[in-house]
Each structure stands twice: as structure tokens, then as C-alpha cells.
Image (spheres, grey):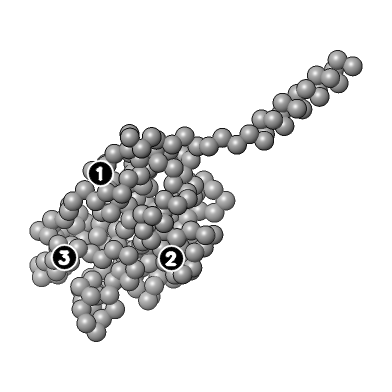
Amino acid sequence: MHTARGVSILTIILIIFSSCQHKAWVLPASERHSDPTACFQRDVLPIFISNCAKSGCHDAQSREEGYVLDSYEHIMKKGIVPGNYAASKIYESMLGNTEERMPQDAPPLSSQQLNIIKDWIAAGAVNDSCGAACDSNNTSFAAGIQPLMNLYCTGCHSGSNPSGSLVLTDYASVKAAVQNRNLVHSIRYDAGYIGMPQTGLRLSACEVRQVEKWVDAGMQNN
């Protein structure tokens, strides 16, 4: 009798606990702040635009799984918990900790990109810009040009099925794109050329000039 009663009480307790839904801890608005190493407009949004807000995925037209990831307002609607990256479904899916890793049909985000998003969420996921960080005189391919390609381009132009059959993941492919695919005209949005990126943020005037200077200097692999 006592054993049956004990089991019954335990069952009730388990039902109560299993039915409880606890909201994820959220950083109070008063404690959220900018992080100069992970600014939304400068560092975070281009990652989402390049890797997520694409046709067939999370642009305004496709809205896969109800997610649109092309602006601060849309990104913050669901899947981001300010101050708590472990409870942020979008970030967890980028890590591969959910049923489906994101992005699905493209290479995983780099550790650097993941850390930028993680640091931004941890600081409170605020909408900031932190000013310009561009140095148009930085014409090193490794330190200046490739990071721009990674930030704005490789989300669409990488993998086994790159947009427009154009890959921009390494020195050889970027150089070929300048020589054969008019890359500079595209990032300048010159008339008669397909502007790139096609959605979201464009390269700033300083960043475009940075690429132009690299080209003018002979497109060195330095």
C-alpha cells in the first residue's frame, strides 16, 4: 500500500515538473551594451545576409520555417535570446546542436563567424554599428581582401552549388573573378553589371576602394 502510494506521489511530481515550461534567462535591457569586436551592422548582419538570407532559405520571400534573417528586427523576432547564446536557437543551429545544422546547403560558419555571433548575443544582442573599421590601404589578400569576401560573398559563392557558378573562397578564385567576371564592377554596382551582394548590405565605399587598390597593385597573393 505504501509503495503504491509512494509511486503515485512520485508520478504526480514528475508530471508537474514535466509540464513546467521555464523561459530562458534574458539579460536585462539595462545591462545590454555594444561590443566593439562584434558590432551588429558591421560584423553580424553581413554574416546573416551572406549565409542565411538567401533565396530558398531565410530571405523575405522564402521564409523557411518562418524565419526571415535579413534585418535586426527580423533576426530578433525569434531564435535570439539577448545575453544567453546557449538558449538562442539560431546560434545553436549554426553550431549544429539542433536537428538541422544551418546553413543547410552550404559550408558551416567558420569559428571566427560563430564567435562574432556568440559575443554579440552575450553582450545583449544590441543593434549597433561601432563606426567604420575599414582601412582602404590594407591591400594584403590574406588580411584585407579575403576577409571581405568571407564577410559579404562566400555565403553565396562557395560549396558545390555556388550562386552563378562563381566561387570566391580563395586567392585563385577571387583573382579569376576580377579578371573574368568583372567583380570590381559588380561590387561598385556599376550600370550594366549585376550588383553584389544582391541582397542586404553592400560593401562600403572604403571597402570597394580597398579591393580596387589591391587590383591596382597587381592582385598579389600576400
- Between the C-alphas of marks 2 and 1, the distance is 26 Å
**Could you say which is closer to the camera, residue 187 or residue 173?**
187
Find residue 37 and name its label. 1
The x and y percentages for residue 140 are 16, 58
**Is residue 127 visible in the rendered structure shown here?**
yes
Taking the image as shown, residue 39 lies to the left or right of residue 118, namely left
The kind of secondary structure element at disc 1 is: loop
Say which residue appears at 23% left-offset and 43% top-offset. 36
Taking the image as shown, residue 193 lies to the left or right of residue 82, namely left
Please state which of the two labelled residues, at mark 2 or mark 1, is closer to the viewer: 2
Say which residue appears at 51% left-offset and 63% top-offset. 64
- For label 3, the residue is 205
The x and y percentages for residue 26 are 43, 36
Is the residue under label 3 in contact with that under label 1 (CB below 8 Å)? no
- For label 2, the residue is 59
Residue 218 occupies which quadrant of the picture?
Answer: bottom left
Of the two numbered discs 2 and 3 on the same chain, state the one appearing first in sequence: 2
Is the residue under label 3 in contact with that under label 2 (CB below 8 Å)? no
The x and y percentages for residue 78 are 47, 50
Of the two numbered discs 2 and 1 on the same chain, state the one appearing first in sequence: 1
- Amino acid bearing label 2: Asp
**Could you say which is closer to the camera, residue 140 or residue 149?**
149
